[in-house]
Amino acid sequence: MVVEEKEEKKEEKKEELGSTWTAGRRSFFAYAGWTLFLGATLAFVAKTFSFTGFFFPKVLFEPSKKFPVGYPADFQDHSVSTIKARRVFVVRDGNNFSAISMICQHLGCAVHWTVEKGVFECPCHGSKYYRDGINFAGPAPRPLSHFEMHVSDDGKLMVDTSIIVELETVLTI
Ligand code: FES
């Protein structure tokens, strides 16, 4: 009788141990599944918002299209001044100022001012423009662009290359 009870207890213990192992295996796979899921999620988030990208906006840092070119007195009367860094010419005639693009209207080369001839010339395919930017020779299909100008609060001439104006538009000060 005592032996039978002992055998029964042994069997019960075995069953308990078996169920414990089954429960442990299930939780192991559950943990593993969650770990994989979280790992994949973190990898996706890290790739999407890379460390530096998270702190800085994804923008191109281009120079502003609105910039000062100097005080009116900096420009001689009846002159064409080249602002190479900004790819514009500032043309002064008396109190009238205009800002003309350096970009050739044919294929985009930079034109230059030829003082002796008094014209803008393109070195690429020979387009030529009068002092007011109107094309008269070569393959350029239209005049050089003219940009909006105004005077800033501190008295400087400002050019805004985001605004193209009519050829005859001048800033009079
Ligand atoms: S790019 Fe100026 S003439 Fe062709």
Image (spheres, rainbow, N blue to C red):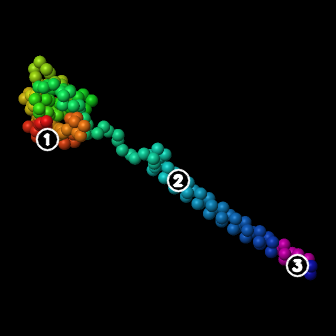
Residue 85, quarter of picture: top left
Q: Nearer the viewer, mark 3 or mark 1?
A: 1
What residue is at 52 percent from the left and 53 percent from the top? 42
By secondary structure, the bulk of the magenta-drawn segment is best described as helix
Residue beneath disc 2:
42
Work out whether mark 3 precedes mark 1 in sequence or the reverse, and give the earlier one.
3
Q: Residue furthest front?
A: 154
Q: Are marks 3 and 1 in contact (CB under 8 Å)?
A: no
Residue beneath disc 1:
165
Where 58 falls versus 87 (above or below)? below
Give the CA distance from mark 3 to mark 2: 55 Å
- Left/right placement of residue 39 relative to residue 68 reads right
Q: Nearer the viewer, mark 1 or mark 2?
A: 1
Give the CA distance from mark 3 to mark 1: 105 Å
Q: Residue furthest right?
A: 2
What residue is at 18 percent from the left and 31 percent from the top? 72
Q: Which mark is residue 5?
A: 3
Residue 8, magenta (yes or no):
yes
Q: Is residue 41 visible?
A: yes
SS for dot 1: strand
Residue 161, magenta (yes or no):
no
* Residue toward you, 9 or 72: 72
Q: Write down the region rendered in magenta.
A: 3-11
